[in-house]
């Protein structure tokens, strides 16, 4: 693999900024982003497809990798990029080639800014990139998807969770989960939502209101009665809001909280006896967020997109974990998104190294073994069907670690199929 780096900024996030990102993303990630023979699912059979042309005259395939090297989501961008490199090595059997075609990757820093990302993508496409991958930011993904369609290049969105990416156009896919899958996973803690009382605890902000709307759209549509307690964004005394939650006696409390007051929130919920007396569910973010929950951690039910070990040590997960660790990185929340993106690129190039339409066809309906388990690209709208996880935390502070309590099958959290927009 030829690895070029063209980054506008190289500053690394401080540990404090990484923690603040983790605090916000504990719930911001909730709303915003078996391998068959001859597929790119395993290193042993990668490159065996005949769709890519003869090796004797094989031209390189240029890939643009957009992620936040800097900016508010830099910690997550790093996870994605590290895993992408490992995934590409895995899926090509360490050669960096598919049917003799070298996969040339050029990295760009989207800085978390849509205008920067679009400018970078246009530059990459102008220089011959036929595949664009990446971004953690949903707003950026929604800008890159139409650009891919306009230029007829393949776009594989990264961790960006917005449901709007699914089915947006023929050229756009995703390598991670979407918000619907997060919320459906949260609902799994009470089984059938029909007749259940679900309360959303968040801030009275666009973020909080979006979470309420999303829970109503997903769990309300399945028969749950959805209410909310919304605190002012600047509130620091959160005891009154914890008391309101307790008085409502919900069957499930869905916590969607962003910002530096998360430790105070969890302390209040613990002191008021909310956690432990009813199902309190929130999203499990990266490892930096684990200390936030304090003594409440082992009483909270977590829905999880991923954490190291969630895949049960399947061979693909093991390869990802070992590869990232060997390269000096740390596996975390969005590692599978980068690894899977590389698997998908190899699969696409096996279909054709030059014809984007053939790349699309190669991915549609593809079932493969990923780090999280069995996954499938739904042909109708390019949703990535994948398992989700239930977890709890053991220990407190720096010793807090997630423990898998259940795996939720991909069919249990699959979003409704959409009609492809174009």
Image (cartoon, rainbow, N blue to C red):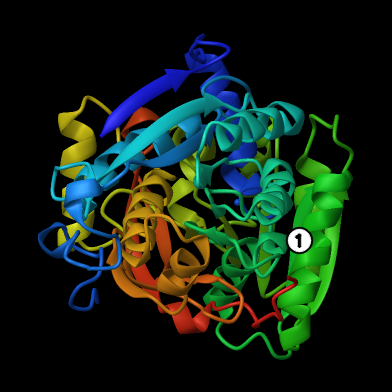
Q: Which SS class for mark 1?
A: strand
Name the residue that disc number 1 marks. Answer: 200
Tell which residue pokes out farthest to the left in this image.
Answer: 44
Depicted 303 relative to depicted 167: above or below: above
Q: Is residue 78 visible?
A: no
Are there few (<14), some (14-19), or many (20+) residues within 10 Å of tag 1? many
Q: Quadrant of residue 380?
A: bottom right
98 vs 205, nearest the viewer: 98
Query: The C terminus appears in which quarter of the rendering?
Result: bottom right
Q: Residue at x 58, y 38 (%)?
A: 125
Q: Residue at x 35, y 50 (%)?
A: 342
227 vs 95, nearest the viewer: 95
On screen, residue 130 versus residue 45, left or right, reads right
Q: Residue at x 88, y 43 (%)?
A: 205
Q: Is residue 154 visible?
A: yes
Depicted 199 relative to depicted 190: above or below: above
On screen, residue 277 versus residue 394, left or right, reads right
Residue 47 in the image: state x and y as whole percent: 19, 59
118 vs 211, nearest the viewer: 118
Residue 136 in the image: state x and y as whole percent: 58, 41
Query: The N terminus appears in which quarter of the rendering?
Result: top left
Residue 147 in the image: state x and y as whole percent: 71, 48
Number of marks drawn = 1
Residue 206 in the image: state x and y as whole percent: 87, 46
Depicted 26 relative to depicted 417: above or below: above
């Amino acid at each position: 693999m030829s690895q070029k780096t063209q980054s506008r900024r190289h500053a690394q996030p401080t540990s404090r900024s990484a923690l603040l990102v983790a605090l916000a993303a504990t719930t911001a990630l909730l709303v915003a982003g078996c391998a068959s023979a001859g597929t790119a699912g395993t290193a042993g059979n990668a490159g065996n497809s005949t769709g890519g042309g003869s090796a004797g005259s094989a031209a390189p395939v240029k890939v643009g990798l957009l992620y936040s090297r800097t900016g508010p989501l830099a910690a997550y961008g790093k996870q994605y990029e590290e895993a992408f490199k490992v995934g590409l090595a895995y899926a090509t059997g360490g050669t960096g080639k598919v049917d003799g075609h070298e996969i040339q990757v050029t990295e760009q820093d989207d800085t978390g800014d849509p205008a920067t990302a679009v400018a970078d993508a246009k530059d990459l496409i102008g220089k011959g990139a036929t595949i664009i991958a990446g971004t953690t930011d949903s707003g950026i993904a929604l800008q890159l998807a139409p650009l891919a369609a306009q230029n007829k290049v393949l776009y594989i969105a990264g961790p960006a969770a917005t449901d709007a990416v699914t089915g947006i156009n023929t050229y756009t896919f995703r390598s991670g989960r979407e918000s619907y899958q997060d919320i459906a996973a949260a609902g799994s803690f009470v089984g059938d939502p029909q007749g259940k009382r679900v309360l959303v605890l968040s801030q009275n902000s666009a973020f909080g209101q979006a979470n309420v709307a999303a829970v109503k759209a997903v769990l309300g549509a399945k028969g749950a009665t959805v209410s909310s307690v919304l605190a002012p964004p600047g509130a620091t005394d959160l005891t009154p809001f914890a008391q309101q939650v307790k008085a409502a006696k919900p069957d499930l409390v869905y916590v969607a909280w962003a910002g530096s007051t998360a430790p105070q929130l969890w302390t209040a919920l613990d002191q008021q006896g909310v956690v432990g007396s009813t199902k309190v569910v929130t999203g499990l973010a990266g490892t930096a967020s684990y200390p936030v929950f304090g003594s409440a951690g082992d009483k909270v039910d977590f829905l999880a997109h991923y954490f190291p070990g969630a895949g049960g040590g399947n061979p693909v997960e093991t390869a990802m974990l070992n590869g990232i660790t060997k390269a000096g990185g740390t596996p975390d929340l969005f590692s599978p998104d980068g690894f899977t993106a590389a698997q998908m690129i190899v699969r696409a190039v096996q279909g054709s190294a030059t014809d984007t339409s053939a790349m699309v066809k190669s991915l549609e309906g593809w079932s493969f073994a990923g780090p999280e388990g069995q996954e499938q690209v739904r042909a109708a709208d390019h949703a990535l069907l994948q398992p989700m996880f239930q977890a709890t935390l053991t220990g407190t502070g720096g010793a807090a670690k997630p423990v898998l309590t259940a795996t939720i099958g991909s069919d249990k959290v699959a979003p409704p199929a959409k009609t492809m927009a174009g």
